[in-house]
Structures are given as C-alpha cells and as structure tokens.
C-alpha cells in the first residue's frame, strides 16, 4: 500500500482491529481526503477477497496480514488464491496487496509462466495514481528477470513520450525494469540499455545495469560518466567500472 498520512494510517489500523468502526470523512484533514477515499474503496473491494481467503481456512481480517506475516510466505494455496483474484479485481490498492502477497511467496518462482504476464499487464494498466502497483509489479519482474521478456522490459522502461505515465517522476518505477535488464546476460541487452542512456531520470540505473553485465567491452561507454557533473552519476559509473574490472581479473 502507498505511504499514507498518519490520520489515514490510523483509520486503516483501526479498521483492521474493528471492521465495524468507521472514521467520518469530515474528520479527515483535507490533504488526506484522496487517500481516505482510496482506503474506503479498498475496504469495500477487498471484502469478497478476504471472505474467500477465510472460506479457505485463513483467519484474517485484511490481506495486509498475509502480505506482512512471514508464516504465510511458504503457503502455495495462498499464492494460488492471490493469482486467481488478481485476474478479477480493479481497485489499485487491492491489486497492490495481491501483488505484494505474490512477491513475498516462496513458491512464486515455480509459477512464473502465470505470474510474469500478470505483473506486466498490471504495470501497463496502472494509472498515474497507481505507483504502488507499478513498484510491486516491477519488484517481481526485477527479482525474476527472463531473457525472453527483455524486449518487453526495455519498452516499458522507455520514458513517457506516449503518455502512458505522468511526467512526475516515473523513474521510481521504471528503474526496476532497468535492473531486470542488467541481470540478463544477452548481447542484445547492450543495445536496449544504450537506448536508455539519454533518459536523465534513470541514467544512473542504466549505468548500474551495464556494470552488472560484467563485460569489459562496456568500459569505454561507462568511462565518460566518471567525470559527469552530477555526483550520483559519477559514483554509479565508478562502481560499475570497479565491478567489471574485478570480474575480469
């Protein structure tokens, strides 16, 4: 779930403790109203999902109990329930909660043929107000990078010329895809990453991805950023070069 203002967090916590207790909308600070409304919508949308989990033997009040409780992470039935519901729901906080359950589950790696297409679809369909969805979907894609999906990663990582994302700092989500590319050892990755070097918002992550390739042929490409005017770019270039040099000794 997104980081919410404290008044809304209290509402969520109290709601988990007592589902019959509601906070009146007029008692919420004006700056918190959008988040308040989102949580109210989430609670309504999540009821049938929670009910299904309870029917399957899980004594929970909210899905966050599963997401943040390690005892559920080794339960494959929970994973299957989350996958099933992810195909049906539309609420962004509910999607984020289900993706979080999938990300934490230890059996996810055995079900990638089902999960990765879902994660990609959720990334594509997330609106500008659903950064939490793209962040969690991105985490899944980064943890389980697949060579056959590298073109998809690169396409999704491209800046927002097509209007898919708002211009307000999409780098927070796109860097997961760049990290995934960096983990794939394929000659075509170089071209895909090179196409992203002009994107200032993810430049440092692209340099890091080149370093993760651990290939000496990328040294000239990275070296020019060692003298960059931006410290965070210089630091990433130095680390990338060091990683490549250590791997080729």
Image (cartoon, helix red, strand yellow):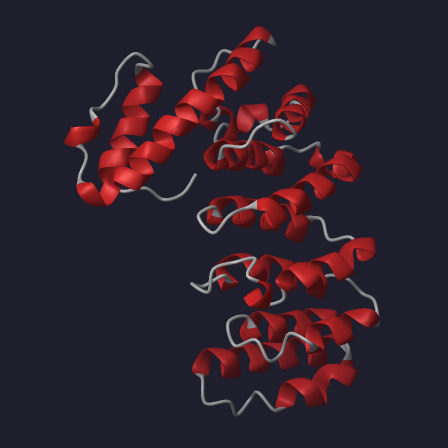
Is residue 100 left or right of 19 when viewed as pictured? right
State the residue at coordinates (17%, 39%): 29
Q: Is residue 32 above or below residue 245?
A: above
> Residue 76, relative to residue 2: is it above or below?
above
User: Which residue shows up at 56% across the image and 65% down it?
Assistant: 160
Instruction: Tell me how many marks there are.
Output: 0
Residue at horizontal 78 percent and vertical 54 percent from the top: 149
Q: Is residue 187 left or right of residue 195?
A: right
Q: Is residue 79 left or right of residue 54?
A: right
Name the residue at the front extreme: 162
Viewer can see residue 214: no
Towards the viewer: 68 or 88:
88
Where does the N terminus fall, quadrant-wise? top left
Question: x, y percentage for residue 199?
Answer: 57, 75
Quadrant of residue 186 in the image?
bottom right
Q: Nearer the viewer, residue 26 or 6?
A: 26
Image position, residue 43 (x, y; %): 40, 23
Image height of 232 relative to 96, above or below: below
Query: Image point 64% across, 81% down: which residue?
Result: 241
Q: Is residue 84 visible?
A: yes
Residue 242 percent across, percent down from the top left: 63, 79
Residue 169 x, y percent position in the rendering = 45, 63
Above/below status of 87 relative to 220? above
| Quarter of the rendering occupied by the C terminus | bottom right
Residue 219 in the figure: left or right of residue 185? left
């Amino acid at each position: 779930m997104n980081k919410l203002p404290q008044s809304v967090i209290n509402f969520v916590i109290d709601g988990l403790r007592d589902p019959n207790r509601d906070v009146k909308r007029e008692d919420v600070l004006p700056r918190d109203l959008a988040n308040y409304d989102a949580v109210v919508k989430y609670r309504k949308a999540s009821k049938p999902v929670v009910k299904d989990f309870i029917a399957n033997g899980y004594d929970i009040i909210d899905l966050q109990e599963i997401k943040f409780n390690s005892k559920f992470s080794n339960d494959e039935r929970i994973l299957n329930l989350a996958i099933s519901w992810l195909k049906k729901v539309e609420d962004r906080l509910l999607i984020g909660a289900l993706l979080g359950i999938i990300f934490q589950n230890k059996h996810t790696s055995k079900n990638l043929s089902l999960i990765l297409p879902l994660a990609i679809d959720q990334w594509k369909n997330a609106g500008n107000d659903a950064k939490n969805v793209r962040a969690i979907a991105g985490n899944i894609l980064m943890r389980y990078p697949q060579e056959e999906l590298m073109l998809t990663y690169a396409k999704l990582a491209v800046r927002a010329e097509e209007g898919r994302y708002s211009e307000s700092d999409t780098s927070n989500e796109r860097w997961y895809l760049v990290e995934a590319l960096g983990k794939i050892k394929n000659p075509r990755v170089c071209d895909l990453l090179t196409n992203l070097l002009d994107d200032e918002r993810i430049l440092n992550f692209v340099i890091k991805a080149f370093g993760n390739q651990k290939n000496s042929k990328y040294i000239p490409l990275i070296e020019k950023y060692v003298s960059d005017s931006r410290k965070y770019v210089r630091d990433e270039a130095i680390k990338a070069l060091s990683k490549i040099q250590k791997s080729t000794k």
